[in-house]
Image (cartoon, grey):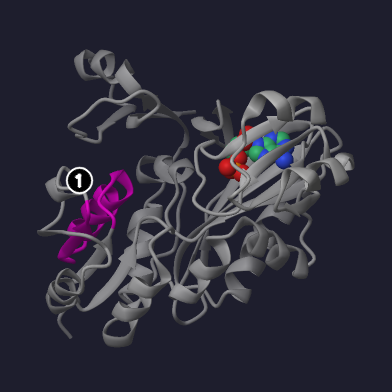
Amino acid sequence: MSKPVLGIIGGGQLGSMLATAAKKIGIKTVIFCDDQDAPAQNFSDKFICGKYDDQNIIDEFMNAIDIATFEFENISYETLNKINNIKSVLPNPSINKIVQNRLFEKDYINKLNIRTTQYVSIKSEKEVYINKEFLPGLLKTTTLGYDGKGQYKINSVDDLKNLNIDFTKEYILEKLVKLKKEISVVITRFKNQEYEIYDPIENIHEDQILKYSKIPADINEKVLEQSKKYARAIAEELNYIGTLCVEFFIDKNDNLYANEIAPRVHNSGHLTINAYNISQFENHVRAVCNLDRVKLNKISNAEMINIIGDQITIYRKKKYASNEFFFDYLKKETKYKRKMGHLTTLIK
Ligand code: AMP
């Protein structure tokens, strides 16, 4: 059987790394992105640029591919569904409906008896006053927020005066957890219901943006097993195909809370490219294209630093040791807080 052509919706660094992993195993890729400077076009076999709701562009994309996947979850359900009616989209777009909305997502996780932070739906300023017991807390837009965008820290209702929050949007108010640590679990589920799970990754965020990741995570055995069990339960319940990441909080008493499901490859999993025999990206491609599963093997411990904004100019000039792997996302424009590259270091 000839290998399928894989369409990837979205053209950022995750798309680039998916396309690179696909190429390694002989899968051709087509990137569909609305940004004509999309960095992933440097790594794919074909690039289609246009709006995600443009029917002609969607048709062109569908004609060029056998299977579609995506590198970010906030593509409209309508677009994904249109494509899925003709060519299969994996993971299934119905999953996006759940995770595109923080409220639906947290309700879903709780239904699986997995603990999340305490949260409440907020539709007006008045409702913040009514739900004071969730303060200090983080007010997050239910949709379209990432890397701290659309989030407000509210210590007390007095803060509302200065924050100038747009209450035409819907929010979720989450009680602040006294964080000891943050971890993530990356898992790939295959069509025959087999799994590969990577070791939990310890993450450090700065200004709500991931700055640093490492394996092994410095966590106790119980948390390690529980986090893997939860990630597996979520993937199973979603009947998921591909790579998925669950982000967790750990509080001062070693309680584990699931924070977010990313139905895609994840920034914290970049170190899997160098630290494992098969990366999260290759496993995603293998799963959605229904290729053989290769047993996962950890090669080394590792740490990863995200290179953000104009720090990239320093890293572009550096010389690297044989255990250091610098990834330049080749983004045309350097922007404040923009992820521009990363550096993985293999450690003992
Ligand atoms: P999120 O957009 O939900 O992934 O949040 C981004 C980051 O903000 C997390 O990785 C945490 O560092 C922090 N954060 C979010 N929600 C909470 C919370 N309820 N309690 C403590 N820290 C949080």
Q: Which residue is mark 1?
A: 38
Closer-to-camera residue (76/125): 125
Q: Would residue 175 be found to the left or right of residue 13 on screen?
A: right
Question: Where is residue 90 drawn, in percent x and y?
Answer: 38, 73
Residue at x 45% of width, y 45% of height: 269
Q: Amino acid at mark 1?
A: Ala
Question: Where is residue 246 drawn, in percent x and y?
Answer: 59, 54
Answer whether residue 285 is visible to the viewer in this image: yes
Closer-to-camera residue (117/103): 103
Q: Where 136 falls versus 276 (above or below)?
A: above
Ligand 1 rendered quadrant: top right
Quadrant of the rendered image containing residue 208: top right
Image: magenta residue range: 10-34
Quadrant of the rendered image containing residue 328: top left
Residue at x 28% of width, y 46% of height: 12
Residue at x 82% of width, y 44% of height: 255
Closer-to-camera residue (19/153): 153
